[in-house]
Image (spheres, rainbow, N blue to C red):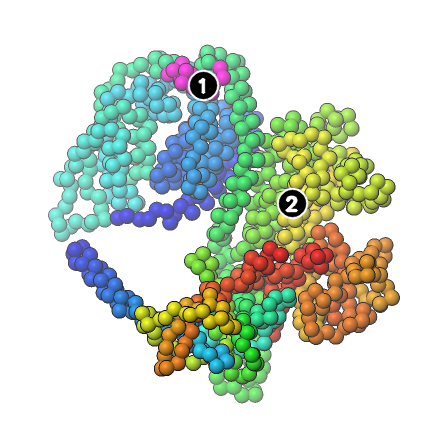
Amino acid sequence: MSIDMSQFHQVFFEECFEGLEAMESGLLNLDMGDIDSEVINTIFRGAHSIKGGSGTFGFTVVADFTHIMETLLDEMRDGRRKVTQTAVNVLLGSVDCLREMLTSIQNEQPVEVASVAKHQAALEQELNGYTTAAPPSAAVAASPAATVTIDAPNKTEAAALTEQGWKIAFCPYLDLLKTGNDPVRMFRELAELGELTTYANTQDIPGIYELDPEECNISWDLKVTGDIPAAEIKEIFNWVEGDCELDIQALVVKTAKPVAPTIAPASKQAEAEPVAPAPAPPPIPAPATAQDTDGIDAVTTKNLITPAQTDAEQIKNTVKASSSIRVDTAKIDALINMVGEVVITQSMLGLVGENFAMDKVDQLKKGLAQLERHTRDLQQSVMNIRMLPISFVFSRFPRLVHDISSKLGKKIELKLVGENTEIDKSVVELINDPLVHLIRNSLDHGIELPASRLAAGKPETGIIELKAYHRGGHIVIEIIDDGHGLDRKKLIAKAVEKGLVEENATLTDKQAFELIFMPGFSTAEKLTDISGRGVGMDVVRRNIEALGGNIEITSEVGKGTTIAIHLPLTLAILDGQSVAVGDETYIVPLVSIIESINITEKMLNKVAGKGETFRLRNQYIPIIRMHKIFNVQSRNASKMAEGVIVVVEGQGVLCGLFVDDLLGQQQVVIKSLEANYRRVEGVSGATILGDGSVALILDVPGLVRFSNR
Amino acid sequence: MNENIAKAAENKERDQDHYSKKLDNAVQYLSFTLGNEEYGVDILRVQEIRSWEPVSRIPNVPSYEKGVVNLRGSIVPIIDLRERFKLKNADYTLLTVVVVLQTGDSKKTRTMGVVVDSVSDVISVDRTKIQNAPDFGTKISNEFINGLVSVNERMVMLLDVDKLLKLEDLDQNDS
């Protein structure tokens, strides 16, 4: 029986990443003073299922690594180990490491052995450091079960304990095979560990007529010889526990060596690990903690480097992972229900239509109304399937804030509000990077150091609030910090220095804050690996506008900064204003429309004899004649007064589109033009109008660029 | 029993081999007319045949790219082959037909419609009888033509769908 396991890989990876996220948030939520065993259990479960899964798929590197984490967590869960901040930090580092490992496996790249070894060492150190610091538990280790958990992480240690091999009496219950376990596979694994001799007891097999091939009637006596840690043997039988009678005994029953094994391996291990900064700790608690902190420094720095490194990888990941979606069954049930209704309505209408007579008009109308309602519901449910709570994005930030703030030496509290606000999956994927950038900015530039906060009469701990809510068909994400705010004088000075604005230019607050979106603009005094290169904000803005959204900044010096991102709920539907240009219809996205006005020829100003502008309140706005740039032959409005100017904004630039008429507002479904055709200048997509014809959706920023050429 | 299954599978495979070999030399083409000329496209590339209906124009593209239509929810471009080959009299009548073709490689397939004067026939062509196209030096450049074949004394030019429908993506995007 051979199954192509690779078909399950995608699911496995998704589950792993979910598990990792759960572990991460669990670890971050651990309150040192008051340990919630349920949280520990959640973390443990995450590790356990990753271990099980990766074992099944043959990713032994992952399985081995997770095993150590699991051992550590297991001890915490049983209360045999105290949960310390150090341990949590080591575990967090391991979660990162696991994520990297899984990512490289997913992308079929080699796993970075060095970093894995480093984290593994840190974990083992944590594990053993405690063991030596608490001799009582080691003393209890005379019982085989305890020895297993303590010895497992380090093979050299284990080797010292186990001598020649193991004798296993394996007596499966009848229904072992039904649980999907295959003894043959287990034996094969055993044979890999050492020399395996098997003896099968077949006397329980019934005669051919009573034989049920799905039952397991055989029991085995196994003998494995070689230096094998008990944990590895146990692990093989891990999945059948409860489905069999199992008795594992060491072949040569070793004489109890209660003291030697715990001390000897400890020193041996210290030699073996150059990573460990201090030699093996003497069994006094104080130095042990000192050494632990050293280890932590190494780990946290590592953490801080990773975000930058993994950025590129993350992009790759999102591209790869975007192919599937997990949906609440309730949503699917609702959908099926709705489809059922549509089918019923359809058959009803079919009946009406079969022998149609005028007296059935009422029935027909009723049917059509019903159909309309069902179609709308159906559309809504389908859209709903693509909706994910924004916590998918938000959940990554506590970690980010935790890491960066500790590196910067700032005290920062992150508040998440409205995590359950739902947003389209495609938006969720694309909004992550811009948000990461904005949060990092707030951390680095926004919130001040504790000392300067106290000096400014603010509480020592800065607050960053990440808030999501719905407003009129849009989702708004706000990043609010109570830092020192944007200093407009500084901004303008910098802009003058860079030659972006004139020396004596008077800028409104809004215009001044807009400056930070200019490419190459940064007021940071020095470059850090977090921010300050000035490449970020323009990219952030471009990404958000590519999603059909916009970004606004309000700030007050000394009080803080609020960055608000407005995004469409979905990328599949857009609120559009249809406009007529000659005989053709185009859709202008409603978000980019500022206003529509009528002007006369007199209000026009020519620039260099060609470009036309008009004055709207205090601003000169360039005019784009749609007939001209789209080469529309038929035209109704040749004079300004006959048409309408639609004032639109794209990438912070205002311009007026001259069209014949405004037709109406409607929601349009965005269809890709590129799927079968190609990208067209000034057009972002197409849609299908009520009469079945196609209308093009204007790409406002593209149009502005296009007309400038 | 397993042996039997294996044998059966083998036989089946051989049969299929044989079958495809038999077909190897015969290829079916859909033939259509553009003006007075007759052309053919690989029938496996033809998705459907539709009557001409008005399209939505795309701004600033070559005139032979007529525009796009809504084909059951997807946006499909329509290309007038008569204009593409610079034939005269490209009128749109009730009989004008759009042949919807599929093109592209394994990575991505595109659907496109081409406007032709009329669809004539499905012809079976012996692959070995296909001649290489000589250099025409005429309206239609050689690159679109896979070869020539004679059907009932008429010459049919066999078109390479992929090359034909390759729009000048790069030229446009670069500019």
> Residue A322, position in %: x, y?
50, 50
Give whichever of A597, B92 is nearer the camera: B92
Residue that numbered label 2 is attached to = A539
Q: Which mark is residue A274?
A: 1
Give the side of residue A37 with respect to residue B147, left or right.
Answer: right
Give whichever of B10, A181 is nearer the camera: B10
On the question of residue B114 being in view, the answer is no
Output the chain of dot 2: A
Decide: is A352 above or below A695: below
Q: Quadrant of residue A632?
A: bottom right
> Residue A364, position in %: x, y?
56, 80
On the question of residue B13 being in view, the answer is yes
Q: Which residues are magenta?
A: A265-278
Give whichever of A94, B133 is nearer the camera: B133
How far apart are the alpha carbons under marks 2 and 1?
Answer: 43 Å
Decide: is A299 above or below A677: above
> Residue A226, position in %: x, y?
24, 25
| Secondary-structure class at tag 1 | loop
Type of the residue with mark 2: Val
